[in-house]
Amino acid sequence: MDAPLSIAVIGSGPSGCYIAQSLRKALPQSEITIYDRLASPFGLVRYGVAADHQSTKSIQAQFSRLFERENVRFAGNIEVGRDISLAQLRSTHHIVVLAAGLSADRAMEVPGEGLPEVYRAGRLTRLFNAHPLEPTGVPTFGKSVAIIGGGNVSIDVLRLLIKQPEDFANSDIDDAMLAEYGQAPVSRVDLICRSTIANAPSDPVMLAELGRIRGVRFSCSDPIEVAEDAPRTALARAKAIGELLEVDPGPETRAEVVLHFGWAPVSINGDGHVRDVELRSVNDDRTNQRLGADSVVTAIGFDFDGGDWHGLGALKADSETGVLDQGLYRTGWIKRGSRGTIAENRSCAKTVADEIIADLDSLEQQSKPGYAGLPEEVRALAVDYAAWKRVDCAEKEAASEARTRRKFPSHEQMVAIAHNKLVESSAAQRGN
Amino acid sequence: MKIQVLFGTESGNAEIAAEDLAESIRNDNQEVEVHDLSSFSIAELQHDSLYVFLCSTYGEGELPNTALPFYADLSVVRPDLSGVRYAMFGLGDTFYKDTYGQGATKLDDKLTELGAQRTGEIGRYDASSWEPVGEGAVVWFAGVLEGVSATR
């Protein structure tokens, strides 16, 4: 092909940044643009990783190099399906890689899931992370909450709910959300995991971290038994839980945390409001138990938002291959499901990049202009990397004491700062 | 003296550090090669090079997946590494204080056990610091080289 290869990556989170890295390395002459519906890059690193896990967020420094040194363009504030169609992107770029992740909390599909105090973990992590498109308002948790799910997301939610305000030093937690939640914090949390301790999906270090929070008493409703020859992670998880039970909460116990392993929800019960959760034992025939709870948080993974994804039909996120169609690929959660750490997206991206490279000869040969081929009014919306840096600086300047930044809760405001415009004029321009 | 930078990474930070370090070595007009440990064989280890390992930590203080085959080969084949010189830089996160930087420590123990000789102290990078990882590696390696020339 004589004309430079043009590549569009949709989504600037870890999977999008890693695939751009791999493609830049393999195709140094190609033109690469990462599109994002938000004015900010980095996706879940910014809005999914918990606000008190700043060292995990430091991966941003690595991804920033794409835009600062590797000649990858950031085009934020452009939403595929709203501002431009997938078909338009495919007609202007040789290669389009979907890396938009999975944003919808998976449903449990048990009776009572629609009760008003049943909340999705994704909503909570977005709220605590000041996601600009998440409807605000602190959920009503009452005195006790049952968290369904045993992965790292459920432990994130648990930690955010039982920490005290002073535990959030050096974070970028949304202070408005934190203050409102602090008015009526929960005093009991039940964490319900359907797997055994040995097979639970949580990282042991995440469990161990809970023991550093003062004023919390931990207990476990099930014996902590793991076979001696179990995998190292299983042993480490059992050890971490054992140590949690030893933690002395001190004279002022604020909260009680009860861990349950091998239990799955049957129903959420209550007359108009959550009253209790019925659980069944997954691996044996112990009788069902009912746990009293004022609210429920579901954290059982993420899935596609809606059935038809931009005319591609109902996709399932469990694909061996990253190939969707000629010149169309997917990587990250949207390919392999919502599992694993940020780093797992790196090896995932490498395999998809290899598939793309192997397909190069079969691509359409005609020249495709890439970003420059987008309609002018769409390009006018774009927040490029330099514009994002204005938001980045403004957020850091606005940080209060003991905070690394203060994220702006309004997307219009982010775009206005990015474009150096007043909020009013930007809102008018977008027609909202 | 040829310098070979070998990185073992999970998230990609050690690769970034390796590239930055190699660039700085090149700017000093020294010969340098960079290899991913996942595609570097223990049979390639030579006496006339200085090997600079940049290695992260993953999970419960393990080596990153990309470095596991190299480590397994060392453990199984047990080559005699007398006369092989190396330096070690570990990436980790003090947030996980019990396992901080253990990946590099493990690799270092293995190389020493097989007779290789480490030059300088093990360098450390802490992800909780938010410092640029490449700069940390470059500053550390300058200190390693000073030690090399001082002992000549």
Image (cartoon, coloured by chain):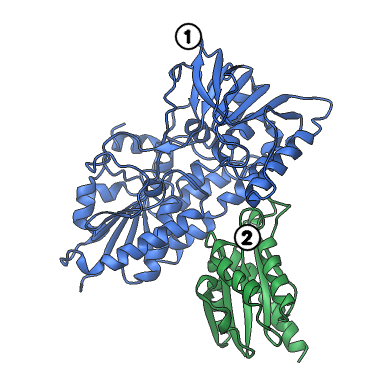
Chain under label 2? B
User: How dense is the environment of label 1, judged by Cα within 10 Å: few (below 14), some, or many (20 and up)?
Assistant: few
Residue visible at 38% across and 47% down? A419
Q: Are marks 1 and 2 in contact (CB under 8 Å)?
A: no
Residue occupied by mark 1: A272
Extreme-top residue of the structure: A271
Amino acid carrying label 2: it is Glu
Q: In the picture shown, does residue A337 fall above or below A26?
A: above
Residue visible at 34% across and 70% down? A27
Q: In this structure image, what is the colour of chain A? A: blue
Q: In the picture shown, does residue A8 fall above or below B34?
A: above
- Counting every numbered tag in the picture gives 2
Amino acid carrying label 1: it is Gly
Pick the residue in front: A266 or A130.
Answer: A266
Which chain is the one coloured green? B
On the picture, is A128 further left or further right than A207?
left
User: Which quarter shows the C terminus of chain A?
Assistant: top left
> What element does badge 1 sit on?
loop
Q: Position of residue A109 (x, y in %)?
A: 41, 24
Tell me the quarter of the picture where residue B17 sits: bottom right
> What element does badge 2 sit on?
loop
Residue occupied by mark 2: B131
Q: CA distance from mark 1 to mark 2?
A: 51 Å
Q: Position of residue B53 (x, y in %)?
A: 62, 74
